[in-house]
Amino acid sequence: MSDIDRRTLLIGAVGTVGLVGLGGVAVWPRSGPSVGVSSEAVRRAEDRRRMTNQNVVDARLTPQPITLNLGGLVVQTWGYGDSLPGPLLRAQAGDLLRVKVDNKLSTGTSVHWHGIALRNDMDGVPGITQDPIKQGKGFTYEFTAPDPGTYFYHPHSGVQLDRGLYGILVIDDPDEPGKYDEEWIVVLDDWVDGTGRTPNDVLEKLQSGGGSGHDNGHMGGMDMGPMGESMRSPLLGGAGDIDYPHYLVNGRTPGSSATLTAKPGQRVRIRIINAGADTAFRVALGGHRMTVTHSDGFPVEPLTTDALLIGMGERYDVVVTLGDGAFPLVASAEGKTGQGLAVVRTGSGRRPGPDVQTSELNRQVVLSTDMTATAEVRLPDKKVDRRHDLRLGGSMGRYRWTINGKTFPDTDPFMVNEGERVRLRFQNRSMMFHPMHVHGHTFALTDGGARKDTVIVRPMDTVEVDLDADNPGQWATHCHNIYHAEAGMMTTLSYED
Ligand code: C2O
Ligand code: CU
């Protein structure tokens, strides 16, 4: 029996097994023999992660309206607390995180822990794992973080991520070899909120055909859509849908960039996170080559390069041995006009200006598909038990982005059983690139490729990934272009009961 037949058949026998979480919280799908988000299976999986004498890390997050100075640019926006990025959360692998969220926004929200293989009911996805945290209300997330790495957190509600609502979560490795002297966190973002448009305005404009090229694409100083000469990337094919007015590194515009300081000759680990909504960045450090050591938190065979390309939702850790002077760390908006900038200073030297060019950007540029997982994180050899094809479709014209022809919540869930090796094949049938993200799991690019939770699929290209279904529940699977996800490109990886 095919998966589809089986589903239809079983859903026919509805009623008793509806997924109703604690306190009558309605979750999706609302019927069918799927593993519930707060079921016994989910609790068992969390129990396996817990250790006796587990260390507890307590934190608080307050999503709220704020006025931010991004460096010469003052905006009204929403943030966690009063900084951009929000507070850095940090724990050791195996710790229990307990994060109390107080929603001071004027609308519902949630917090999703991007990349963490956590318990399903703490995944923070309204409509799938919880109800939104209402205005004025709170919610406490409590989960074990099993794997070390660079992660981030953000809302999973509408296009809120494209405001100032994001922060970094670092899970340290108790066995970290620590072959570096300093550690920096570099968060990249594309910025529009508070410049005359909110992300909601942008989405509305896209959905009303603002991106189709019928007008000449200008919207409050912002170009939209692939008709702009600049909106093309030889590396990616497409380049996103929005030419943003600003690109930020660590919440600063290039005109008033952050300075990262160290001593000449020191080895620095840089954790690079793309928290943008619609922009991939090409990243390089002037005068240096970087060695990529981790992709989405998991180690890769060290790969030395001049530049790397990072999609929305991806993270890379690199190690660099620093020269003497002042160097631009440039995050060029791939296929768009503009860049983010930080300055690395180890000695004297003129501060690079906001438009500084660095030749490394146009030398060797790597993507995750160029990387190999280290032996200890390679998926063990096993035959594939279950295959699913995800055909990615859509266009700027109607601004409707689909998986197998459907938009969320009408998309078909991808059914799996606990214990299976699952192969997902992302087939991009559109002219836009899509960074595809699976919650609650880390997949492997096939043939020993990098372990990841978010992978760029170029226009008309196909990417295959394998994962072990070892974390029961209902897991959002979507494009990490937040506008695409909001316009339908989302489904669930759904465990059968
Ligand atoms: Cu950062 Cu559903 O994702
Ligand atoms: Cu997409």
Image (cartoon, rainbow, N blue to C red):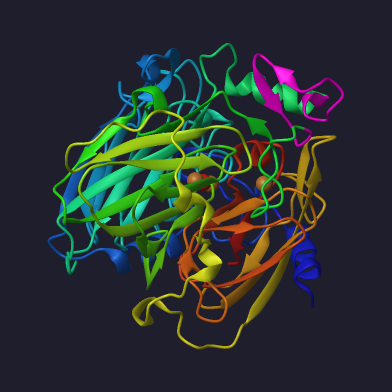
Q: Quadrant of the N terminus?
A: bottom right
Q: Would you say the magenta stretch is mainly helix, strand or loop? A: loop
Residue 246 in view:
yes
The residue at the far right in this view is: 214
Q: Is residue 452 left or right of residue 153?
A: right
How many marks the image carries: the answer is: 0
Q: Is residue 472 depicted above or below 338 in this figure? A: below
The quarter of the picture where residue 46 lies is bottom left
Task: State the image coordinates of residue 151 (x, y, percent, origin top left).
Answer: 37, 50
The residue at the far front in this view is: 349
Q: Quadrant of the C terminus?
A: bottom right
Q: Is residue 102 depicted above or below 285 in this figure? A: above
Residue pictured at 46% horizontal, 55% vertical: 307
User: Is 426 in the magenta?
Assistant: no
Task: State the image coordinates of residue 400 (x, y, percent, origin top left).
Answer: 78, 39
Q: Is residue 49 depicted above or below 410 in this figure? A: below
Residue 16 in view:
no
Task: State the image coordinates of residue 28 (x, y, percent, origin top left).
Answer: 62, 46
Residue pictured at 34% horizontal, 36% vertical: 342
Q: Is residue 289 left or right of residue 262?
A: right
User: Is 215 in the magenta?
Assistant: yes
Camera-side residue: 453 or 292?
Answer: 292
Q: Is residue 458 depicted above or below 467 in this figure? A: above
Q: Which residues are magenta?
A: 209-227
Camera-side residue: 16 or 162?
Answer: 162
The quarter of the picture where residue 4 lies is bottom right
Camera-side residue: 67 or 343?
Answer: 343
Q: Is residue 185 left or right of residue 92?
A: right
Camera-side residue: 21 or 239?
Answer: 239
Task: State the image coordinates of residue 314 (x, y, percent, origin top left).
Answer: 48, 52
